[in-house]
């Protein structure tokens, strides 16, 4: 199976997007698809039960090494997505990526460049760049 690049995906989305060409439509569809991803994950917990959430305060400090943090910090998830829930989450993530690519297209933004730039920021800023 051939692997699809982000640029190819972005072009494919551009070719397919007819109904929601308005920036406002795409922004609202992106928000809606984000909610659908959250809903699919929530249903995996509350309806299926294949994963559980056990959350509590994360104990970390800026003095920690990344290895220490990876050992100490918790995802708060136990279990694994079952086949049905994986399908549902994948489908919703796919729609979310579709509208994200649409937004990039409308704004003239290259998704591949966004990922490369963010990767550079992550490398430069290190472990606590998103805190």
Image (cartoon, helix red, strand yellow):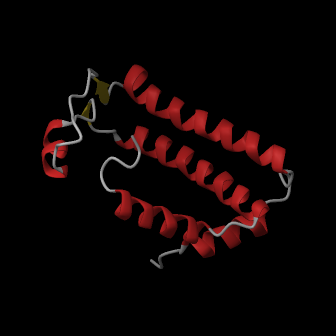
Closest to the observer: 127 or 34? 127
Closest to the observer: 27 or 90? 27
Q: Residue at 72% of width from left, 55% of height from top?
A: 103
Q: Residue at 59% of width from left, 35% of height from top?
A: 36
Horizontal side, residue 81 vs residue 23: left or right: left
Query: Which quarter of the rendering shows the C terminus?
Result: top left
Q: Residue furthest front?
A: 63
Total marks in image: 0
Horizontal side, residue 10 vs residue 69: left or right: right
Query: Which quarter of the rendering shows the N terminus?
Result: bottom left
Residue 117, percent across and down?
A: 51, 67
Q: Give the vertical position of 46 relative to 22 (above or below).
A: above
Q: Residue at 41% of width from left, 20% of height from top?
A: 46
Closest to the observer: 9 or 87? 9
Q: Quadrant of residue 108?
A: bottom right
Residue 94, percent across and down?
A: 56, 52
Horizontal side, residue 112 vs residue 31: left or right: left
Residue 42, percent across and down?
A: 45, 27
Q: Quadrant of residue 78?
A: top left
Closest to the observer: 10 or 86? 10
Q: Residue at 67% of width from left, 38% of height from top?
A: 31
Q: Give the vertical position of 50 relative to 107 (above or below).
A: above
């Amino acid at each position: 199976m051939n692997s699809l690049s982000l640029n190819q995906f972005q072009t494919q989305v551009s070719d397919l997007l007819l109904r929601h060409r308005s920036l406002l439509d795409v922004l609202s569809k992106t928000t809606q698809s984000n909610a659908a991803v959250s809903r699919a994950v929530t249903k995996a917990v509350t309806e299926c039960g294949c994963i559980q959430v056990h959350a509590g305060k994360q104990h970390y400090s800026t003095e920690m090494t990344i290895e220490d943090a990876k050992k100490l910090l918790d995802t708060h998830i136990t279990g694994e997505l079952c086949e049905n829930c994986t399908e549902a989450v994948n489908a919703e993530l796919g729609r979310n990526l579709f509208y994200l690519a649409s937004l990039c297209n409308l704004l003239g933004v290259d998704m591949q460049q966004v990922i490369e730039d963010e990767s550079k920021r992550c490398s430069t800023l290190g472990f606590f760049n998103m805190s």
